[in-house]
Image (cartoon, rainbow, N blue to C red):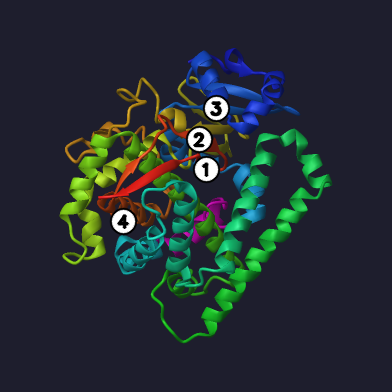
Amino acid sequence: MKSTKDTDVSFFKVLKNAKRILKNPLPFHHENFEKYGNIFKIHLGFGKTVLFTRDASFAKHMLQKNHRKYYKSELQTKDLAKYIGEGLLTANGEKWLKQRRLIQPAFHKKKLETIVITIKDVVIEELSRIVPGKTVNIFPLMNDLAFKVVAKSLFSYTDTGDTISRLQYITETAQKTLIKEIRQPYKRWWFNLSGKIKSTLQLTQEARDILNALIEERRKSNKSYDDLLDMLLESRYEDGSAMDNEQLIDEILILFTAGHETTSNALTFTLFLLALHPKIQDKAYNEASITKDDDVSPIEQINKYQYVKQCIEEAMRLYPPAYFSDRVAIEDDSYDTLELPKGSMILISFFEIHRHKELWKNPEAFDPDRFAPHVDKKEYSDKYFPFGAGPRMCIGNNFAMYEMILAVSEIVRKYEIKTTFDAIEIKPLITLKPQNALLTFTPR
């Protein structure tokens, strides 16, 4: 491994590439990885530096093997937290551990079985909006679907009008503001002075007020809904106390942001890839068409859709919705020949790890057979991070997979998906978003 002095990217080079980094930083990252190897250092000015890595073993070291020496950085614990609160995604240390222990049972597979019926109902309702034979950008529909699945699963919310749309708008506006802060840290003084940050914070307070009203309404109700909000309200800390409204709102905002964003992205990428690969789509159709809705329960259906699941897993390899993560060393550490003093900030590129030519055979190819049942999971588990890894692995991974399997199987059973494009455009924000996902759905 080279010393980091041999792999430094100057602040001048960052400024020179500022416009393209703001639009899409991935090509800039890739160029540096190809030039310097699996680890390089970027200078951000004011003495700040960040290590970028696509070393899968280094990622496992930080996320799993030596996770106690690393916290999430201020990008999440401060910058993101100011918009969505301090919950599972943004908390560190004892606060995070306390919340994880409290919330984990609500996302147990057995608990989710009661919610799967709700998920399927929303999926069928939303997919009825597909206009056969018309070329459409499928992302907005997938975005609405994922948001409403979270809303209905969280608090059995049936309003399809202004409230849900308003929460969506606020969530997306906060993300756009945050991405500018992250990619242009040298302009934060202007974002504050211009009132951009203040106006976004006012919007997020509006979202908190909406959610607080919903929670209060539920607390006063004697009715049981068997949804995630019921489970969260019934959850108790070790001392027997429950979450207060502020903490509940933090967790709900995080579930909305993380739960719908990543899922809508992954669904769109999966559908687009199936359109680009008709033979793979036909194989998914053959599997989905065998199982009839009336024959088995939704959870049994999910278990039968093995190849559909593989298509989604492969789509998340090529286009991981959570395409990066970051960590800060909270004490001195080392990896291989690399010394990591306390305070070192590291950004892990899952996008690069998932496409690393030394880790994957034909890494650019869409090949769902990489995840076939006969393939030993050890062949890919150390280099595949669609939901992160270690103790902080995404708590909603099963929920997301259930939703995506039901949605993709439902679509391929009913429609043949086509596109006139030969590639997918991407827009990396907080999550990896698809752009101009124009598809045509022809009834089978």
Q: Mark 2 or 3, which is nearer the eye?
A: 2
* For residue 360, side relative to residue 260 (left or right): left
In the image, residue 55 sits, relative to residue 182, either above or below, namely: above
Q: Residue 426: which numbered mark, if any?
A: 2
How would you rate the neighbour count of disc 4 (Cα within 10 Å): few for under 14, some for 14-19, many for 20 or more? many
Work out whether mark 4 precedes mark 2 in sequence or the reverse, and give the earlier one. 4
Magenta residue span = 87-104
Describe the element under mark 4 as helix, strand or loop. helix
**Residue annotated with mark 3:** 52
Q: Mark 4 or 1, which is nearer the eye?
A: 4
Please indicate, yes or no, whether residue 373 appears anywhere in the rendered image. Answer: yes
Work out whether mark 2 precedes mark 3 in sequence or the reverse, and give the earlier one. 3
Q: Is residue 369 one of those drawn in magenta?
A: no
Describe the element under mark 1 as helix, strand or loop. loop
Q: Is residue 97 one of those drawn in magenta?
A: yes
Q: CA distance from mark 4 to mark 3?
A: 36 Å
Q: Please, what is the three-letter code of the amino acid marked with disc 3?
A: Phe
Q: Please, what is the three-letter code of the amino acid marked with disc 4?
A: Leu
Describe the element under mark 2 as helix, strand or loop. strand
Q: Provide residue 389's location: percent of width, then percent of height.
A: 41, 42
Q: Residue 431: which numbered mark, if any?
A: 1
